[in-house]
Amino acid sequence: MGFSVEVVKGDLTEIVVEVIVNPSNSFGFMGGGVAYTIKKKGGVVIEEEACSKAPIHVGSAVLTTGGLLKVSNVIHASTMENPSEKIGVGNVKKAVSAALSRANSRTFKTIAFPGMGTGVGGLSYDDASKAMIHSIFGFSNSNPNSSIEKIFLVAYSDELYKVFNKWLNQIQEIK
């Protein structure tokens, strides 16, 4: 694998990386969950730019400024077509792959993901984490020369932290 994956507990908007991922809807609206936190801390300019690049269909991702955040850029990887829509794991897999592809195309070295689909998307930590880890390792296998060196999985709760680590450890044992 060309990059390492680390699970950390904390606030996605406080992680020191080149780019963070927002699990977005296709419109770019940032009204709830992780998106709302990013907009609240980084400013409405992030949402305005995301909306200007809509539609962001599931399986695609766009890059915006980080506004007032510590990070310079935000990748908006669509996990749902409509705001507050319940989703399946397939959407998470597509969004993670799209975010990694966008990061690689911009030659970012460090990227941080929240629990994609675990908020308004309605997925369990277990289902979402498994899908995310499998997508990350699938991307690694398909892109051995990726610019990405480090991926952070940022858990806002102790439970998500444990589940991220469970799936990361399981896949690393297989490798």
Image: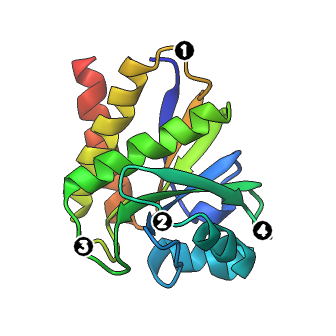
What distance separates the C-alpha of mark 4 from that of mark 2? 21 Å
Q: Are marks 2 and 3 in contact (CB under 8 Å)?
A: no
* Location of the C terminus (image quadrant): top left
Q: CA distance from mark 1 to mark 2?
A: 30 Å
Numbered mark located on residue 134 in the image: none
Q: Regarding mark 4 in the picture, which secondary structure is present there?
A: loop
Count of labels in the image: 4
Q: Which residue is denoted by mark 1 in the rendering?
A: 145
| Residue 133: % across, % down | 32, 40
Q: Residues within 10 Å of mark 4 (few under 14, many from 20)?
A: some
Q: Distance from label 1 to label 3 (Cα)?
A: 34 Å
Question: Of label 3 and label 4, which has the lower sequence position?
Answer: 4
State which quadrant residue 18 falls in. Answer: top right
Q: Residues within 10 Å of mark 3 (few under 14, many from 20)?
A: some
Q: Are marks 3 and 4 in contact (CB under 8 Å)?
A: no
Image point (74%, 75%), residue name:
45
- Please state if 152 lies on the left or on the right of 105 as rendered: left
Considering only order in the chain, which callout, 4 or 1, is on the residue closer to the N terminus? 4
Q: Earlier in the sequence, mark 2 or mark 3?
A: 2
Q: Are marks 1 and 4 in contact (CB under 8 Å)?
A: no
Badge 1 vs badge 3, beta-carbon distance below 8 Å: no
Label 2 sits on residue: 55
**Which sits earlier in the primary sequence, circle 1 or circle 3?**
3
The residue at 28%/36% (across/down) is: 134
Secondary structure of the residue carrying tag 2 is loop
- In the rendered structure, the answer to whether residue 71 lies left or right of residue 134 reads right
Q: Secondary structure at mark 3?
A: loop
